C-alpha cells in the first residue's frame, strides 16, 4: 500500500480526510498544515499520494507540485473556480463539495496509475556504463574466438548463463574472461 500524506491548512479538515482514508484501508503517514511540512515528509519517503487543498500559509499548490519528488501524485481537493492559476500538471482535481465515495474511488484510480507508472519505470532496460559494455564485449570476443560463435550467439550464451546462475551479465562476463 502506498504512503499517503494529508495536507490542509485547517487541521480539522486534514483529520477528517485522514479518518476517511484510514477507514478505507489507506496508510496515512502524516497530516500536515503547511507546504514545508509536506515537502519534509515527502523527502523521507520513496513515493506516494498527497491529498491536499490548494493553498497553504507558506505556498500554493503550484509551488508544492514543482518542489515534490516525481514519485508523488497530488490529489487536489478544491473547487474548480478557486484554481485561478489552473490545476498543476501533476495534480488530479477532486471537486468540492467532497463525497466520500468520490474520494475513495479517485484514490483507487490514482494508486492504480502510480503502480502502473512504477512498473513501467522498473521494466525499462538499465543503461550500462562504458566499462560494463567493454567487459561484456571482451567476453563475447573471447567466446567468438575460442568457440567460433557469432556475436549474437556469444551474447545469448552470456545471457543464458547469467540467468541460470542467478547473477548479472557483468559477473558472467567476468567469469568468461577469467577462464
Image (cartoon, rainbow, N blue to C red):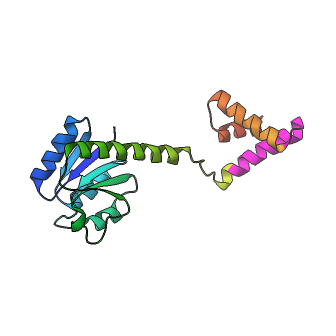
Residue 163, image x and y in percent? 65, 31
Residue 126, image x and y in percent? 59, 48
Count the marks: how many?
0
Magenta range is 133-150
> Where 133 sits versus 142, above or below?
below
Nearer to us in this view, 102 or 8: 102
- In the shown orientation, is residue 29 left or right of residue 141? left
Name the outermost residue toward the bottom: 85
Check the picture and name the quadrant holding the N terminus. Answer: top left
Check the picture and name the quadrant holding the C terminus. Answer: top right
Q: Quadrant location of residue 62?
A: bottom left
Name the outermost residue toward the top: 164
- In the shown orientation, is residue 143 left or right of residue 72? right
Q: Quadrant location of residue 97?
A: bottom left
Q: Main secondary structure of the magenta part?
A: helix
Residue 87, image x and y in percent? 31, 64
- In the shown orientation, is residue 57 left or right of residue 69? left
Q: Is residue 112 magenta?
A: no
Q: Quadrant location of residue 177?
A: top right
> Where 56 sits versus 4, above or below?
below
Q: Residue at x 67, y 55 (%)?
A: 130
Q: Is residue 134 magenta?
A: yes
Residue 78, image x and y in percent? 22, 59
- In the shown orientation, is residue 122 left or right of residue 151? left
Nearer to us in this view, 43 or 20: 20
Q: Residue at x 20, y 64 (%)?
A: 55
Amino acid at each position: 500500500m502506498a504512503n499517503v500524506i494529508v495536507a490542509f491548512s485547517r487541521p480539522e479538515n486534514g483529520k477528517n480526510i485522514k479518518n476517511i482514508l484510514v477507514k478505507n484501508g489507506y496508510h496515512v503517514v502524516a497530516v500536515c498544515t503547511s507546504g514545508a511540512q509536506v515537502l519534509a515528509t515527502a523527502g523521507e519517503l520513496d513515493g506516494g499520494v498527497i491529498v491536499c487543498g490548494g493553498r497553504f500559509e507558506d505556498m500554493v499548490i503550484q509551488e508544492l507540485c514543482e518542489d515534490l519528488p516525481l514519485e508523488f501524485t497530488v490529489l487536489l481537493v478544491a473547487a474548480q473556480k478557486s484554481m485561478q492559476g489552473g490545476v498543476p500538471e501533476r495534480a488530479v482535481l477532486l471537486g468540492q463539495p467532497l463525497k466520500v465515495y468520490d474520494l475513495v474511488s479517485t484514490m483507487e484510480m490514482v494508486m492504480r496509475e502510480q503502480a502502473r507508472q512504477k512498473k513501467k519505470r522498473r521494466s525499462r532496460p538499465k543503461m550500462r556504463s562504458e566499462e560494463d559494455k567493454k567487459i561484456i564485449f571482451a567476453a563475447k570476443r573471447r567466446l567468438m574466438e575460442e568457440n567460433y560463435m557469432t556475436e549474437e550467439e556469444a551474447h545469448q550464451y552470456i545471457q543464458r548463463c547469467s540467468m541460470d546462475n542467478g547473477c548479472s551479465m557483468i559477473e558472467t562476463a567476468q567469469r568468461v574472461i577469467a577462464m
